[in-house]
Image (cartoon, rainbow, N blue to C red):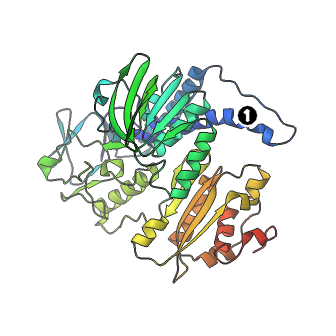
Amino acid sequence: MALIGSGTIGGTCVNIGCVPSKTLIRAAETFHNARVAARFAGISAKAELIDWRGTVRQKDALVSELRQAKYTSLLPAYDGIAYRDGPARLVEGGVEVDGARIPAGKIIIATGARPALPAVPGIETVPHLTSTTALDLEELPRSLLIIGGGYIGAELAQMFARAGVKVTLVCRSHLLPETEPEIGAALTGYFEDEGITVVSGIAYRAIRKAENGIALDVSRDGQNTTVDADQVLITTGRAPNTEGLGLTEHGIALSPKGGIVIDDRMRTSRAGIYAAGDVTGRDQFVYMAAYGAKLAAKNALNGDSLRYDNSAMPAVVFTDPQVASVGLTEAAARAARHAVLVSTIGLDQVPRALAARDTRGLIKLVADAGSGRLLGAHILAPEGADSIQTATLAIRQGLTIEDLADAIFPYLTTVEGLKLAALSFGKDVTKLSCCAG
């Protein structure tokens, strides 16, 4: 068995994605915590940025440690796996790496994705940051323009703003367009409270170099305007890494957006060749890539019996408050012809938030009106990420909102909000005593 990789071993997550971004997000969070410490009577705090270069280098050390421990050092523990470093290309009967042919009856393509540039005139000629290079900045700019309001843009906008950068985020629709609209709207307000300028509903006209950095010309509601900043960060999506693999020559179909087309068994349009992860252009989360790759490997070796199922796929955005979702949004449930019941409560109804003196956020549940089955759960809360798995399991097991309301939840936890939201389908939770149901 051969494992072929081109470039740094470990892929996106450990090297340039989840690990480095989340550690810097947590670092910047310390500034916010100090600024809002006075929400508790008698407490004052201060956090000072003295060496962002040191923070970034600490991040680099963590990445290096995890890459060594979880990738490089693990390979010798697996007998029969030969690792080859170099660009690969499909050939008849196998793969070619740096001129050497490796025969293979079954092949899995998991080459990932990279930051993509939007179709903005002038973008190719303007120095710009990506989600990769932004995490390596050792000196912070005074001002930063972020183009793109998806999860990467949202996370990095808040991180840089909390570190003292003047941030403007622009997007064509609105912040986090794939989430429930209530969540995007609320988070936009929280961003603005922290000094982040969010400009939504725009059309990009052109971008160019300016005397002190860059300038983006946009139109909004029929009016033209210009946004200036020292630097620009592009977070408008990712492009699958399919170039140079010889896919077209071997009859492997690509989607209109460039991802490898696969079926629910992880099979491409060419027999014996499978694909998983970001290169497919769908479900771009590291845990879904791992899940899909495991299915692909098992199917390749054992007869294609396993099906890919993303119906209970949790997704988290590491802003503050965190955004956590699973299952269908209200709009998606209606589009799927469900008769829909919806329950939404503010975090001011969750005792954990009251005790923490931080009631930013909401919890929204979507259920089927006929069966009561939970279809979707959407959380905006400072500790929301660690609560979504309860809803994930509920959806996976086909539980109803009554099942959720009847379950025993620990008091003074964020996840208790799921029970309260379930209860609010039929009760006014403002009139319940603590722990009552």
SS for callout 1: helix
Question: Which residue is nearer to you in this view: 238 or 153?
Answer: 153
Q: As displayed, is residue 46 above or below residue 147?
A: above
| Amino acid marked by disc 1 | Ala
Residue 96: image location, x then y, percent: 19, 39
For the question of whether residue 414 can be seen, the reply is no
> Left or right: where does residue 407 sit relative to residue 255?
right
Q: Kindly identify the residue that appears in the image at 72 percent across and 62 percent down.
A: 349
Name which quarter of the figure residue 308 lies in.
Answer: bottom left
Q: Residue furthest bottom?
A: 370
The quarter of the rendered structure image containing the C terminus is bottom right
Front-most of 349 and 26?
A: 349
Give how far across and how far down residue 37 sits, in percent.
77, 38
Q: Position of residue 336 (x, y in %)?
A: 40, 72
Q: Residue at x 50, y 30 (%)?
A: 64
Q: Residue placed farthest to the front in the image?
A: 222
Q: Is 385 positioned to the left or the right of 437 in the image?
A: left
| Residue that mark 1 sits on | 34
Q: Residue at x 78, y 31 (%)?
A: 45
Where does the image place residue 34, in percent across and percent down from the top left?
73, 34
Question: As rendered, which of 175 and 156 lies closer to the eye?
Answer: 175
Tell me, yes or no, if residue 323 can be seen here.
Answer: yes
Q: How many marks?
A: 1
Give the residue furthest to the top: 211
